[in-house]
Amino acid sequence: MDILIRDIDLIPVNGGEDIIRDTNIYIEGDRIACIGEFRDDRDVDRVIDGSGKVAMPGLINSHTHIGMSLLRNYADDLPLHDWLTKRIWPIEAKLQAEDVYWGSLLSMVEMIQSGTTGFCDMYFFMDEVGKGLEESGMRGVLTRGLIEDDEADKKLLETKELYRRWNGEANGRIKVMVAPHAPYTCSPAYLRSIMELARELDAGIHIHLSETRREVEESIEEYGKSPIEHVNDLGLFDLPTIAAHCVHIDDGDMDILKDKGVSPVNNPGSNLKLASGFSPVDRMLKKGINVALGTDGASSNNSLNMFREIYLAATVNKAVNMDAVSIPAYTAIEMATINGAKALLWDEEIGSIEVGKKADMIFIDMDKPHLYPMHNILSSLAYSVQASDVDTVIIDGDIVMEDREIKTLDVERIMFEGERVARDLINR
Ligand code: NI
């Protein structure tokens, strides 16, 4: 379908802090064909009135576990280690494919409604997430989380199968990467076989690194190295890597991340709630490291709202650094868009609104009391916009949500089934 969006304010996120006022965007098929003057020589199938709205690239949630929305508000106010080992892992062991299917769809509804168009997911029963991506129209990276246990080799085969079935599917909206859960759940030998698989598939890596102080202390005890030094010495960073968290890191770690082109993902909401600490985001960005933004799962956040995460990235870092200039509004927006696209190895296609790129974009309805007066659109987007201000979502040139109505999914049914399988799961 060819779409013309008329008279819209545009934040392209392509370098400068530009705002293009009152412009027109032409989408042809899945791509952005032209931005600027209205042209009456062009035929389109649909015209959308963009007045009173701001167009920006769709948000990219670079680290999440979307099946975990079933465990939202199930276990809270616990230290990370107890939360994970005593509450989350035991119930996750009972999860079945159908649970992950409905949990993932529930998350996709929430993500679309809050302006997220693409995400990087680490979980299991990932075929179910693949099906959800096909149905919802979203864009995503599927990664099967690899924790070393009796089924370690089987999980590697599952990753291989996942790649074969889904990589490049749905008009290229789906990618598959390889996901060692963390260096504390994968031995060096297992990490080596994971790296071998990633090389064989020519796929990137998605891993948790240096999330807690305890993890770093135990790594130094066991290997004499920080988690980042440890996996770097094993050669992991010779593959393109998305590293969730990177909270407890020093200058040496940062130099490695920079040299190896690793993309850390800041998850401020999850880090705050699990009291994991504060990632040195400002210092990483100043060193030229590509820091992306994510929510982590809905059981540690407890939301997948990337606008809240943008707000937290900008405000938490200011407070921690005692520097009100730290992570300005536009930087936080970049973390949630173009930096995410770079992390997911997708920046040639998405992450900004530019001619030739895929049409993944969202429109914010600015005609809201809490956004008046309009002194500064970038500040509005980072500090004042609510998820419910997202009016329209276009992914791969398709209108996935318009006037807040999701076109691709049956929201009522997904809420019903999500509740049903969650009840069943905790009674299992
Ligand atoms: Ni995580």
Image (cartoon, grey):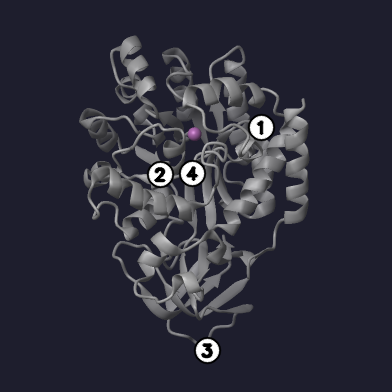
Does any portion of residue 255 appear in the rendered image?
Answer: yes
Q: Secondary structure at mark 1?
A: loop
**Residue 353 position (above or below residue 413):** below
Q: Residues within 10 Å of mark 2 (few under 14, many from 20)?
A: many
Left or right: residue 44 compared with residue 274 = right
Q: Could you give the CA–CA distance between mark 2 and mark 3, rounded to whole angstroms?
A: 39 Å
Q: Nearer the viewer, mark 3 or mark 1?
A: 1
Kindly identify the amino acid type of the residue bearing the numbered disc 1. Phe
Residue 173 x %, y %: 57, 51
Q: Quadrant of the C terminus?
A: top right
Q: Nearer the viewer, mark 2 or mark 3?
A: 2
Q: Could you give the CA–CA distance between mark 3 and mark 4, rounded to whole angstroms?
A: 43 Å
Q: Could you give the CA–CA distance between mark 1 and mark 2, rounded to whole angstroms?
A: 23 Å
Kindly identify the amino acid type of the residue bearing the numbered disc 4. Thr
Mark linked to residue 295: 4
Asked whether mark 3 lies closer than 8 Å to ligand 1, one says no
- The answer to whether the residue labelled 1 contacts the one labelled 4, judged by CB atoms less than 8 Å apart, is no
Left or right: residue 96 compared with residue 346 = right
Q: Which sits earlier in the primary sequence, circle 3 or circle 4?
A: 3
Q: Residues within 10 Å of mark 3 (few under 14, many from 20)?
A: few
Q: Secondary structure at mark 3?
A: loop
Residue bearing mark 1: 125
Q: Which sits earlier in the primary sequence, circle 2 or circle 3?
A: 3
Q: Quadrant of residue 291?
A: top left
Residue bearing mark 2: 343
Residue bearing mark 3: 40
Direction bottom: furthest residue: 40
